[in-house]
Structures are given as C-alpha cells and as structure tokens.
Image: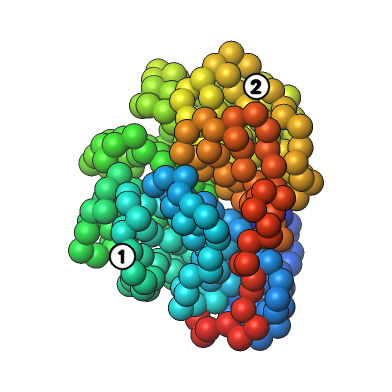
C-alpha cells in the first residue's frame, strides 16, 4: 500500500538488512492503515480527506477520497454520492458528466454513468494511484509494483510496464502520447504501441504530471522536484521550495499551478515560479480547474479551496461548510 496521499514519500534504498527491517515496518504500517481493517474504526461525522478532483465544468465536478467517499458539486452545493465501497479512492478522471472513472486501493475501479457508481472488474489487486483517459474507450490506471491497466470501452486489461517501481500518476495529450511517473525517478512513455522508460536528469519520486500540449509538460515530486518537457528534453526547474509537490494543473502553459504539503501553492506565469500566500496549512492532494478563474484544490480534513483568479479561499467561507461527512455505517468493501 502506498502512503503518498497521507504522508511524505518514503524513500527506500541501501542494503538487504535495511530492506528487511523496512519490510517489517512496512507490514506493520500496512495493518495500521488498511481500508479493510480500519473500516470498523471509521470515525463518524467527520470530514473526509480528499485525494482527487476532476470535472467537465466548474458547475459539475467530482471529489474522491478516503473510505470510498465521493462528492459532487452541481454549481450550487456539494453533495455526497453513494460509491458502494469503503475502500480508499486515490484519483478520478472522465470525459463527460456521464463517463467518470475513479481508481483506488486493492485494484478498485469505479465508473459513473450519470446515474450511479458501479464497480468494474480491473483484473488487478495492487493499489491504483492515478487514472487518466483520452476518451470513454481509452483510459489508463497506474499503481503499485509498476501496475498499468487499460480500458478499451469493453474491459480492463493489464499492460506490460517493464518496471516494478510504484507508479503514482498518468497523463497524456493523446492516445499515442501518454506518460506514467512514479518512485525512484521512474518515467514511462507510451507511443501508441509500447511503454518505454525515459531517463530523467534529476532523481526523485514523481507524483504529479500535467501538460498543455505534447511539448509543454510539467512533472512534480518530492523535495520540491519540478521538471519541464519542451518537446525535446526534460529540464529541471527551480521551484524554490523543498516540500513534497503532489499535483499540477494549468489553464495554459503560462498559467500553471502546483500544490503540495503544508498548503503550498506555486504559480508559473511562463517565466518563473512564485510561491502564493497560503490559504491553509493542510496538505493539498489534487488540483483541477475549468479556466484561470475557476480552479479547485482538495486535501486533508475535508479541505476544498477555490481560486477565483485573484486569491485562494476555503469553500467553507464562500458557501458554508459542505455537507460531506464520513458515514457512521460505511458500506462493505
């Protein structure tokens, strides 16, 4: 199980003794945070921590998070949706309000057809950390142990990635140009035929990727790591920070936002990165927008931030605290 959504990235290296001890600690941590084991102790009447946000307009977007929580904004208010599960959800994407996919732990894939969420057979059991699609019949999900699965409109099928490293995120500009990134400086590229590794000029664990075009792509990760692809090569950029950067999105290549730990928000104007005034000290897990003045970022403890083109504010101060709370009796996994 990966810890990327709730804590800084854990780096594992060195010799066999270290790996043996790390394996023991990892197993104990796994027992302490497993959605299955934690379900019985799930707190009631508390705001969920959100891990993903996506929409097709500012008046219609989705949030996913811990314990299978899903929320929807209809342009006026946030309402909870029935996911049918208490398994952690990691990411969400879609192509329309009637074709939305969510990915989560234990190989979980959910699909929303505009009426209800239903579980899909993914064919894998590894945790899924990221999801992206170019259309309802071309969707990728990535996860632990180099897992990549693809949906062709009929079924999900595993795809050979060529790595055992954790994959945290996936994004593409077309069906023939898709990237997946993850731990230990892993970056893979799909050219429409096969996934191939790319050697990066900077080491790190990379957890967020987005681009405005095939030759304008941003990659973010731990310790303030930030890289840019100009169509020819990947170039390190100076972020000016050392925090974990978790998500990136922009309205254009000259209006890009990055969010991360401690409420961190960075903005790129096409020339340089600037650290914006913090609206929170909570970790921000995901960002999505519908233009330069309708951007949302989500994170811990039910946090939903909105950017109106001038400043970031907590949605709770704009429209009142959203009625999105953990249920007292969660559904079975």
- Element at label 1: loop
Give 133 or 315, whichever is nearer the viewer.
315
| Horizontal side, residue 152 vs residue 78: left or right | left
Given the current orientation, which residue lies at the most extreme right position?
281
Residue that mark 1 sits on: 113
The percent position of residue 311, horizontal first and vertical second, equals 68, 33
Give 3 or 70, whichever is nearer the viewer.
70
Q: Which mark is residue 320?
A: none
Label 1, label 2: how far apart the Cα atoms are: 39 Å
Examine the rendering and report whether any part of residue 235 can be seen: yes
The percent position of residue 219, horizontal first and vertical second, equals 53, 33
- Looking at the rendering, which quadrant does residue 32 occupy? bottom right
Residue that mark 2 sits on: 273
- Looking at the rendering, which quadrant does residue 38 occupy? bottom right
The percent position of residue 131, horizontal first and vertical second, equals 42, 52
The residue that appears at 44% across and 19% down in the rendered structure is 230
| Horizontal side, residue 25 vs residue 203: left or right | right
The percent position of residue 207, horizontal first and vertical second, equals 56, 44
Q: How crowded is mark 1: few (under 14 residues within 10 Å), some or many (20 or more)?
A: few
Given the current orientation, which residue lies at the most extreme top position?
271
Which of pointers 1 and 2 indicates the residue nearer the eye? 1
The residue that appears at 68% across and 60% down in the rendered structure is 321
| Horizontal side, residue 162 vs residue 31: left or right | left
Image quarter in which the N terminus is found: bottom right
The residue that appears at 51% across and 85% down in the rendered structure is 332
């Amino acid at each position: 199980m990966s810890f990327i959504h709730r804590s800084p990235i854990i780096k594992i290296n060195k010799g066999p003794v270290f790996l043996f001890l790390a394996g023991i600690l990892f197993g104990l941590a796994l027992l302490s945070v497993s959605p299955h084991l934690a379900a019985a102790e799930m707190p009631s009447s508390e705001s969920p921590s959100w891990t993903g946000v996506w929409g097709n307009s500012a008046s219609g977007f989705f949030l996913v998070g811990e314990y299978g929580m899903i929320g929807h904004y209809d342009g006026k208010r946030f309402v909870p949706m029935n996911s049918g599960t208490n398994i952690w959800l990691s990411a969400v994407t879609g192509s329309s309000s009637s074709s939305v996919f969510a990915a989560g732990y234990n190989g979980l894939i959910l699909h929303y057809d505009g009426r209800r969420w239903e579980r899909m057979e993914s064919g894998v059991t590894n945790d899924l950390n990221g999801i992206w699609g170019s259309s309802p019949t071309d969707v990728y999900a990535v996860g632990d142990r180099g897992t990549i699965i693809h949906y062709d409109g009929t079924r999900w099928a595993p795809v050979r990635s060529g790595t055992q490293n954790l994959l945290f995120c996936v994004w593409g500009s077309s069906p023939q140009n898709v990237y997946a990134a993850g731990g230990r400086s892993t970056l893979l590229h799909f050219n429409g035929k096969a996934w191939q590794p790319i050697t990066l000029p900077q080491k790190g664990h990379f957890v967020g990727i987005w681009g405005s075009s095939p030759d304008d792509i941003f990659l973010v990760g731990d310790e303030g790591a930030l890289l840019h692809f100009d169509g020819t090569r990947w170039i390190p950029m100076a972020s000016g920070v050392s925090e974990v950067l978790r998500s990136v999105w922009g309205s254009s290549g000259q209006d890009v936002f990055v969010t991360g730990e401690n409420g961190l928000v960075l903005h790129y104007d096409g020339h340089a990165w600037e650290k914006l005034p913090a609206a929170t000290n909570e970790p921000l897990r995901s960002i999505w927008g519908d233009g330069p003045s309708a951007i949302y970022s989500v994170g811990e403890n039910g946090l939903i931030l909105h950017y109106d083109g001038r400043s970031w504010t907590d949605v709770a101060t704009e429209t009142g605290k959203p009625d999105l709370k953990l249920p007292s009796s969660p559904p079975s996994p």
